[in-house]
Amino acid sequence: MTPDDRDAEVDAAVVAAFVARVAEVAPRLAGDDAVRAELGGRAAAVLRVVHARLRGMPMPATPAGPDVGGARARTGVHPAESLRAAGLLFREALPPLAAAHPELPAERVAVVLHEVIDTLVLPAAVSYVDVLLARLSDANRDERRRVARDLHDSTSHGIGAAMQGVDLALHLLASGRTPDVDRLRTTRQVLLDTLNEVRSMATRLRDVVGPRSLGQALQEYLDFAVPAGREVSFTDAGEHAHPLPAHVKEESYLIIREAVRNSLLHAAGATRLEVDVEVAEGRLRATVADDGSGFDPSAVDGSRTVGLASMQERAEGLGGSVLLQAGPGGVRLALTVPLPVAA
């Protein structure tokens, strides 16, 4: 048997063992036949390069594969799964490789194997981050567009209506007539409503969680934003015992706040709003639900679908997900975010 034949035999056994066990450490990666096949192909490519480096031979050509990191980000697979799969490949490959190269110290085989795996993992990590940064940029752009739309649709119209009332009062005064007091009161109310809308937009733009807990920040927002007459139920469990990382608090707050805002703006006939946050079993779970008339997600206008897309992108940036359920009995949005495991 030639060295190449022996290498191929070793590689086949390692790849088979790796693919068979990858579900134990990376269940989301192993849940798709095509992804498992891709993992097996990448593992085989790693082993070929390791054999060549250990023997001092030219590096074998490796065909350009897919943008693995980008694909993982787009499908919501956290990079921790890829890292665990890489660790499994190292453990499965090291003993057979060391046995196949008895002329070299096992430490040398381990170093080369580790370096070759790193050459695949690091570029994937970079492309993963690039996709997430692009998503965050899109989410921020959508937020700016929404603020611009609110300024145009609400604030500018309110100021315009108030200006008409003021102009009319000035015209009446200039002609020696008394302005209509009721109309002036209406104009004043329009200005007050517009001022409150501007304050609300300013709060949304600057609001961050900071040193507060997620629960505290949400409670304060609900106290400020929910109008009189809407019953609100808010529960917050587990965060005191399991404090959230700052980036999880900030992004989760933006997602939940957007869901609350959508309910307040669009839930026709709603009398109740329920917001629940729970930190347990290594996950943050939050729901926002109302008892309004509901809606058909496929038939709503762009303003609401943009908000949902922004929430989904922020959740995926945390390795989590957003699930929307809408029907005649109301709307329920559920956020799930896996939390980093403490070292």
Image (spheres, rainbow, N blue to C red):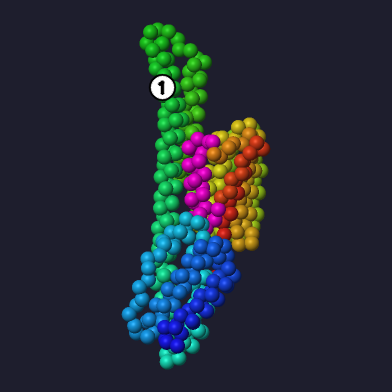
Q: Is residue 41 above or below residue 102?
A: above
Q: Amino acid at mark 1?
A: Met
Decide if residue 50 is in sight here: yes
Dividing the image into 4 quarters, which one contains the C terminus? bottom right
Q: Is residue 2 above or below residue 88?
A: below
Measured as percent of width and height from the top left, residue 320 is found at 54, 56
Measured as percent of width and height from the top left, residue 266 is found at 56, 35
Determine the residue positioned at 61% across, 36% down: 294
The image shows a total of numbered marks equal to: 1
Assign the magenta stretch its main secondary structure: helix
Decide if residue 224 is in sight here: no
Nearer the observer, 41 or 138: 41
Determine the residue positioned at 51% across, 24% down: 189
Determine the residue positioned at 45% across, 34% down: 150
Determine the residue positioned at 35% across, 73% down: 61
Which stretch appears magenta? 299-321
Measured as percent of width and height from the top left, residue 133 is found at 41, 55
Left or right of 219 on screen, residue 199 = left
Q: Quadrant of residue 293?
A: top right
Residue farthest top in this picture = 176
Residue farthest front in this picture = 1
Q: Is residue 307 within the magenta segment?
A: yes
- Number of residues whose C-alpha sits closer than 10 Å to that of mark 1, classed few (under 14), some (14–19) or many (20 or more): some
Mark 1 secondary-structure assignment:
helix
Q: Is residue 80 above or below residue 293?
A: below
The residue under label 1 is: 163
Nearer the observer, 182 or 149: 149
Q: Is residue 297 within the magenta segment?
A: no
Measured as percent of width and height from the top left, residue 23 is found at 58, 68
